[in-house]
Image (cartoon, rainbow, N blue to C red):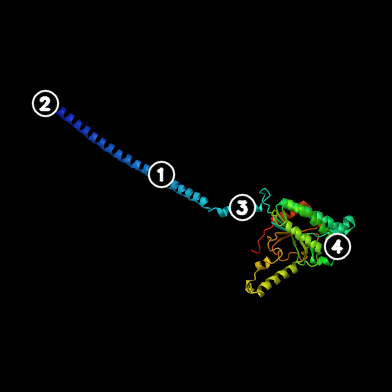
Amino acid sequence: MNSNINDIYIVNNHVGKMNDWLVSANDYHHIHNQSDILIDELKDLIILPYLVFVCLLGVFLALYLVFSLILALAVACGWTKKASLVASQANSADKKKGGTGIITPRHIAVIMDGNRRYGKSMYGVASQGHHAGGRTLSNFVDWSIEEGVEVLTCYAFSTENWKRSKEEIDCLMTIFHHYCNEIMATSISKNIRIRVLSSDEAPIPDNLSRLFREMETKTRHCNGFSLNLAVSYGSRSEITRACRSVAQLVEKGAINPGDITEDLISEHLLTGSLPPVDLMIRTSEVRLSNFLLWQLAYSELVFLSKNWPEVTHSDLRDAILTFSSRQRRFGK
């Protein structure tokens, strides 16, 4: 009897342990399932931001490709023409300066004063100063071309200069005649166009007037440089002539008084076909002496305290540097 009871006890004990094992196994499976769920949740937390990053990167690359395509089309269609024009203007302003930023004036006007004083001080004879001034003008033309200037207008003889003595006037006319013959051939070889600006041609000797016309005709095709010689010139008489020409147009009914503008007046000046004067250089004195009064309205002015025959290439370079350092606002 006792033996049976012990057997039953042992069996029950084993059954209890098996139940414990079953419970433990169920707990293990439950915990394992919970771990799988947690791992899946962690995977979602890690993968989701990664997927968002990849998507954003793809959008960025797509936008970059679209922008690149638009830019390429813009270049092909010429949308960058304005930028090219600005760059071209900058290069033009720096021409022959190696990109140093020095702005070269396109049009320089010169009042060549002090020839007589120089002649008297150096040679004891005023007329020799005019000869020396002619040589300086020839050099100045070459210097201007070298510096990249396009137009040079020189005050050679004013309408007021006719009031000087006959001897001096005859001397000057002879110098002009000799100088014109000398520069005519060299101007053609150097591609220099010559114009003679005269607001009053009547006092000019006939032989010199013919030479002036010949010089203008023979160099008319030249386009490398423009040299303008103001002979028997006065700015007031030039402006008067321009106003008279415009008044005649009104009288003929070609235009109305309301059509008269500054541009119209400028077109009827002797310099009507020329670009505006950027820089005016005068030697010896500090005044304009009835020279290009209309044209110099917004020009930069440089005065040299030396006589014209004493001017050097360095003086021209210094004047250009001075011009380049100034800010031209034109009233703005």
Under circle 1, the secondary element is helix
Residue 260 percent location from the top left of the image: 65, 71
Choose the circle earlier in sequence order: 2 or 1.
Answer: 2
Q: Residues within 10 Å of mark 4 (few under 14, many from 20)?
A: few
Q: In this figure, which residue is indicated by the disc labeled 2?
A: 4
Choose the circle earlier in sequence order: 4 or 2.
Answer: 2
Choose the circle earlier in sequence order: 4 or 1.
Answer: 1
The Cα–Cα distance between marks 4 and 1, rounded to whole angstroms, is 93 Å
Q: Residue at x 83, y 61 (%)?
A: 173
Q: What amino acid does circle 2 point to?
A: Asn
* Quadrant in the picture for residue 133: bottom right
Q: In this figure, which residue is indicated by the disc labeled 4?
A: 170
Q: What amino acid does circle 1 point to?
A: Val
Left or right relative to 45: residue 297 = right
Q: In this figure, which residue is indicated by the disc labeled 1?
A: 54
- Judging depth in this view, the residue of 178 and 160 nearest the camera is 178
Q: Which mark is residue 211?
A: none
Q: Residues within 10 Å of mark 1 (few under 14, many from 20)?
A: few
Choose the circle earlier in sequence order: 3 or 4.
Answer: 3
Q: In this figure, which residue is indicated by the disc labeled 3?
A: 88
Look at discs 3 and 4 and give the one toward the viewer. Answer: 4
